[in-house]
Amino acid sequence: MRNIRYPIIYHPSYDIPLPENHRFPGTKYSALIKELETTGIIENYLKYVPKPATAKYLSIAHDPFYIQAIETGNLSKQEQTRLGLPWSKTLVQRSFLAPNGTLLAAQLALQTGIACHAAGGTHHAHWDFGAGFCVFNDLAYAARALIAMKLAKRILILDCDVHQGDGTASILSNDRDIFTCSIHCAENYPPKKAKSKLDFPILRGSGDEEYLSVLAQCLIEMDRINFAPDLVLYDAAVDVHNNDKLGLLKMTSVGIYQRDKVVLSHFKNQQVPIATTIGGGYGETHEEVAQRHSIIFAAVQSVFQN
């Protein structure tokens, strides 16, 4: 076994203060790092810390007026309700850091073959508004930034969150060099789905076997299309889990591990670099959610050290 340490991108300011019993696990990011340290998985990773994105550069994926509204807290009550998160200076700091965390993961993946962001996957953020606990869309931002910097010509965003990546699909609907693919629960949020380049809806209550079968069909279809990406942005969300509070699917932790290994192995075998994000995950405790989010890091260790 090779002793290689892979990039992990994390910032201590990712945690956000939220009211007690809020559905979003605001401290799951530090809890994830603690889980990786406790299990020893972190020893396989080399930590990188992102710098905040500028408002000017974020405008590659978002309306400058919306960015300014987030910066200043000038959001209406309706806009905050749609976002699902109360405005705070900490939220602003985190929101400008996380997109650059995914961009940094992508840049490092192009060098090393694999890199993991201990956040990201905020795919419900649209061009001019935030939604579903997502302020800025790190996937759309990172993909467009990489192409603007001429670090890649074609990028695939493979979104395995239980909720469709409607914001990502909407922002990138006319980007011919960025391919959006979403595998999601058909009956879950958002009620009105966007149109990804490729969508694979799954019925409520589906478990490991059904999910992995759809994933196999998805990978076959992407190979048939022959988009030939220079990089994959992989949203390895865990809200597909049977015990997830917002999920509606019945996958086990073993099934999620198999899903991640299938995805990672597929693109590793094609010699396509992969940058992972953690996406959604909701549970009774932040520690429970963090344990599930650690699965992608264990899968990376298994696939890339063999």
Image (cartoon, rainbow, N blue to C red):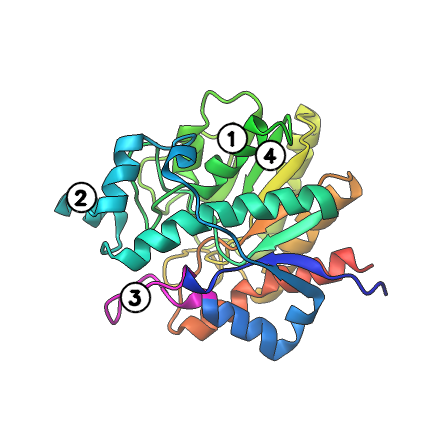
Lower sequence index among marks 2 and 3: 3
- What residue would you read off at disc 3? 17
Kindly state the secondary structure of the residue where label 4 is placed.
strand
What secondary structure is the magenta-colored segment mainly?
loop
Amino acid at the residue labelled 4: Leu
Q: Are marks 4 and 3 in contact (CB under 8 Å)?
A: no
Kindly state the secondary structure of the residue where label 1 is placed.
helix
| Lateral position of residue 171 relative to residue 118, left or right | left
Q: Is residue 20 magenta?
A: yes
Marks 1 and 2 sit apart, C-alpha to C-alpha, by: 26 Å
Q: Nearer the viewer, residue 225 or 23?
A: 23
Amino acid at the residue labelled 2: Asn
Q: Which residue appears at 35% of the width and 35% of the height?
A: 126
Q: Nearer the viewer, residue 48 or 39?
A: 48
Task: Indicate the position of residue 38 as horizontal and vertical percent values.
Answer: 59, 79
Task: Indicate the position of residue 291 as horizontal and vertical percent values.
Answer: 53, 70
Question: What are the residue bounds of the magenta stretch?
Answer: 14-29
* Residue 151 against residue 46 in the figure, above or below: above
Q: Which residue appears at 38% of the width and 55% of the height?
A: 94
Lower sequence index among marks 4 and 3: 3
For the question of whether residue 214 can be seen, the reply is no
Lower sequence index among marks 1 and 2: 2
- What residue would you read off at disc 2? 74
Question: Circle 4: is it few (<14), some (14-19), or many (20+) Cα within 10 Å?
Answer: many
